[in-house]
Image (tube, rainbow, N blue to C red):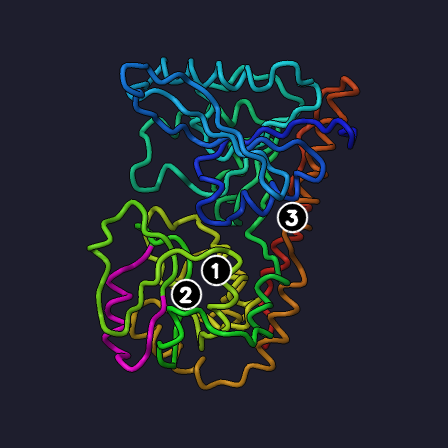
Amino acid sequence: MPDPAHPADLVCFSHLRWDFVRQRPQHLLSRAAKQYRVLFIEEPVFVAPDGDAVASPRLDITLRPDGVSVVVPLLPQGLEGDALSFHLSQLIYALLAGRDPSSRVLWYYTPAAVDFSADLPAAVTVYDNMDELSAFLGASPRLLAQESALFAKADLVFTGGMSLYAAKRHRHHSVHPFPSSIDVAHFAQALSHDGAEPADQLEIPHPRVGFFGVIDERMDRDLVAQLADQRPDWQFVILGPVVKIDPAALPRRPNLHWLGPKSYEALPHYLAGWDAGFMPFALNEATRFISPTKTPEFLAAGVPVVSTPITDVVTPYGAKDLVKIADNAQDMARHLDGLLRQPRDLWRAAVKRQLSLSSWDKTWAGMHGLIQGIASAKARGRAISPVQPSRREAAISALAEPAHV
């Protein structure tokens, strides 16, 4: 495996920006940076010419404190199709020139990147399929074909949840479920936080019911409005950036507080002041396979939460009565009524048992072990037998066994 003095490259192609919201890629790749030189390649930014000068294709590279190098291709406006792929390919090949590909790992979050990286040599190619991107608002109609090409290229496929695993397990010989995990210590800061409240939350009365995350087509805005109308004395605090939808389309009520995006570091300080949480996900194609990272994050912060019936929330969290499941605003209000009144000692004990079963450290260790297995087999020149997912599937399914609180 990589020499610590000369680490191998892990080259990640992502549709997400490193500085957008701390999600699965940041959790995993910051851990990978302890063993690899991680290059996190974002989608290009298109630059207008400076006066009469034509903008030249180039890479903006910044090394972050966690050891990840964030790489942003800067390209002239107007590039598309084959010309776009050509320039991206040239930039990436130049970036990796002189680096040994025999231990390189390619890591894909976006199948679109195969258009300019299909011939890039590597020891192991990983597709970390965290979401069904083809179902998202504004997805390219070419994405499904690109994903098929990525399945053909990949040595390993990881999925962001069990429902996505069930949908993809027959499309590749080595598919492995790695559901959303948790940095317990970070969110547990909410349990012991005794500092000043964030200024924009300080004057909001109790009871407070909160949500944090990206606000897009996956949020059921009608449900949010109905819930606010049904409980006008409750205050709903909603954190996160608004993307792909018009902010003017968000419901406005005196008890709805849209506070905008917050840093990962600040989230426990907000959650410390919440009496309960809610996850008002719409039930649509975009949410069919999601495995929300915020589910265990709410629990680690000691905030009881109600969710709409997202498959990967129902099992295991709803099945174990760690998260209440509601089909509509009336049910959600009823469950929140109960959560605001109920004692929490038994619930917190059950939460602690559940969260002890997973962590981002364990997730990365499991992924890395599979990568090492593929790399070692290739280095020995053996044909690689399909890695059977049955044992891992059984282990993760066991986490979904109902338990009494």
**Image check: 213 left or right of 223?**
right
Q: Where is 55 relative to 345, above or below?
A: above
Q: Where is 250 relative to 377, above or below?
A: below
Where residue 9 sits, quadrant-wise, is top right
**Residue under the image location 51 percent in, 18 percent down:** 118
Label for residue 363?
Answer: 3
Q: Where is 26 relative to 308, above or below?
A: above
For the residues labelled 3 and 2, the Cα–Cα distance comes to: 24 Å
**Residue under the image location 66 percent in, 47 percent down:** 392
Over which residues does the magenta segment extend?
Answer: 219-237
At mark 2, the secondary structure is: strand
- Neighbor class of circle 3 (other Cα within 10 Å; few <14, some 14-19, many 20+) is some
Residue pointed to by mark 1 = 313
**Residue under the image location 51 percent in, 49 percent down:** 23
Three-letter code, disc 2:
Ser
Where residue 403 sits, quadrant-wise, is bottom right
Label for residue 307?
Answer: 2
